[in-house]
């Protein structure tokens, strides 16, 4: 259960409705998910977060599927059930298969294991891995 009231479209102030409309238009959906409804309790936070999502998740050097898969990986590692589910759904919509998800989770698991080992052993970073001074 959410810690704050979820703001439904019909109960939203005009500023929130404008963001909701943009979310639905941008994503090609006819509903607002609970994450945005929770953020709507603070319209400035809702606006700022939506603008950041639109900017960062837009096509760029990384294609949208790769961005969603990175989001799934970070969400799984951070233990965010909501984001893991929502971005897995978004990645599937963009073409991620079950095989891709399983391989992604294998990489996530391996990275978490080897990160803990390297950190626990306090292994010095090899000079060959460090950027050269310009």
Image: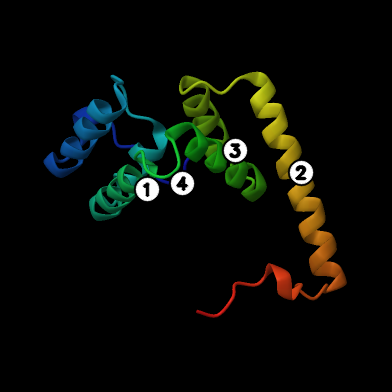
Q: Quadrant of residue 40?
A: top left
Q: Secondary structure at mark 2?
A: helix
Which residue is denoted by mark 4 in the rendering?
A: 3
Q: Residue at x 47, y 41 (%)?
A: 2
Q: Secondary structure at mark 1?
A: helix
Which residue is denoted by mark 2 in the rendering?
A: 109
Query: Above or below — where is 115 with respect to 54?
Result: below
Q: Is residue 7 left or right of residue 111?
A: left
Mark 4 and mark 1: Cα distance apart in space: 27 Å
Mark 2 and mark 3: Cα distance apart in space: 16 Å
Mark 2 and mark 1: Cα distance apart in space: 25 Å
Q: Residue 7 location, x and y as percent?
A: 30, 37
Q: Secondary structure at mark 3?
A: helix
Q: Nearer the viewer, mark 4 or mark 1?
A: 1
Q: Residue at x 63, y 50 (%)?
A: 78
- Callout 2–callout 3 Cβ contact below 8 Å: no
Sooner in the amino-acid sequence: mark 1 or mark 3: 1
Query: Above or below — where is 1 with respect to 77?
Result: above
Q: Residue 53 location, x and y as percent?
A: 35, 45
Which residue is denoted by mark 1 in the rendering?
A: 56
Q: Residue 83 location, x and y as percent?
A: 52, 39
Mark 3 surroundings within 10 Å by alpha-carbon count, few (fewer than 14), some (14 through 19), many (20 or more): few
- Looking at this view, name the residue that lies furthest to the bottom: 133
Which residue is denoted by mark 3 in the rendering?
A: 81
Residue 1 in view here? no
Mark 2 surroundings within 10 Å by alpha-carbon count, few (fewer than 14), some (14 through 19), many (20 or more): some
Mark 2 and mark 4: Cα distance apart in space: 31 Å
Q: Residue at x 76, y 72 (%)?
A: 126
Sooner in the amino-acid sequence: mark 2 or mark 3: 3
Query: Above or below — where is 132 with respect to 25?
Result: below
Mark 3 and mark 4: Cα distance apart in space: 16 Å
Mark 1 and mark 3: Cα distance apart in space: 21 Å
């Amino acid at each position: 259960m959410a810690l704050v009231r979820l703001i439904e479209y019909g109960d939203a102030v005009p500023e929130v409705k404008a963001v909701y409309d943009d979310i639905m238009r941008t994503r090609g959906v006819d509903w607002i998910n609970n994450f945005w409804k929770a953020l709507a309790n603070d319209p400035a936070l809702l606006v700022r977060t939506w603008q950041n999502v639109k900017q960062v998740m837009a096509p760029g050097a990384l294609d949208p599927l790769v961005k969603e898969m990175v989001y799934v990986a970070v969400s799984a590692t951070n233990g965010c059930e909501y984001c893991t589910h929502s971005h897995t759904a978004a990645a599937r919509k963009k073409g991620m298969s079950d095989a891709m998800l399983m391989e992604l989770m294998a990489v996530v698991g391996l990275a978490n294991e080897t990160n803990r080992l390297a950190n626990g052993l306090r292994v010095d970073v090899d000079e060959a891995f460090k950027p050269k001074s310009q």
